[in-house]
Amino acid sequence: MRLIDADALIKKVECLFKDLNSTEDYMGIGYNHGVGDGIATIKNAPTIDYPIEQIKWERDVAIEQLKFIGKGLGEKMDDVKPVKTGKWIEATNDDPCYYYCSECHWLSDIKTPYCPNCGARMGENDE
């Protein structure tokens, strides 16, 4: 999909037509040759206002959430904690189908990219 400036396109078409037919009346011969229909098609073409409105709404929600925690757009988050990293360690009990997090010792039956209990990011070489 290509987004265009419809107003600029209409202006360009009108200018081109006037340049090519400078001696003719624009509303006369131009509309008789389809230029008017082309301009009407451009004016009546569907727009993408909804996605733009959706983006504006999402931005406004994000700003409200930042205000709620006392921060603004572009403001440094001093209280952000560093990312914990860990690894899944195979449990040594009778059932080898369980793993525990090296950070919080949460027991899990699957290896996930993050520990669901403490949020630690699990390394590539989990064992």
Image (cartoon, rainbow, N blue to C red):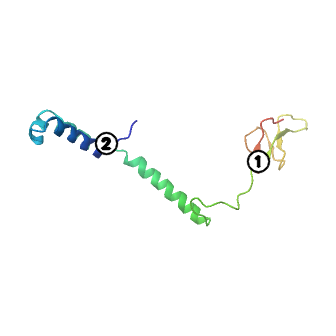
At numbered mark 2, what does the secondary structure look like: helix, strand or loop? Answer: loop
Whether residue 25 is visible: yes
Callout 2 crowding tier (Cα within 10 Å): few <14, some 14–19, many ≥20: few
Of residues 39 and 53, the one drawn nearer to the viewer in this rendering: 39
Instruction: From the viewer's perspective, tell me whether residue 75 is left or right of residue 23.
Output: right
Q: CA distance from mark 2 to mark 1?
A: 47 Å
Kind of residue at badge 2: Pro
Please state the horizontal and vertical placement of residue 73, each as a whole percent of the image: 56, 60
Residue at image coords 16%, 40%: 18
- Position of the C terminus, as image quadrant, is top right
Q: Which mark is residue 120?
A: 1
Of residues 125 and 28, the one drawn nearer to the viewer in this rendering: 28
Give the mark nearer the N terminus: 2 vs 1: 2
The residue that disc 2 covers is 46
Q: Which mark is residue 97?
A: none
Instruction: From the viewer's perspective, tell me whether residue 76 is left or right of residue 57.
Output: right
Examine the rendered structure and indicate whether residue 1 appears above or below residue 54: above
Residue at image coords 75%, 46%: 115
The part of the image, by quadrant, that contains residue 102 is top right
Kind of residue at badge 1: Ala
Instruction: From the viewer's perspective, tell me whether residue 11 is left or right of residue 72.
Output: left
Please state the horizontal and vertical placement of residue 55, each as a whole percent of the image: 46, 51
Whether residue 44 is visible: no
At numbered mark 1, what does the secondary structure look like: helix, strand or loop? Answer: loop
Instruction: From the viewer's perspective, tell me whether residue 51 is left or right of residue 76.
Output: left
The part of the image, by quadrant, that contains residue 9 is top left
Residue at image coords 81%, 41%: 87
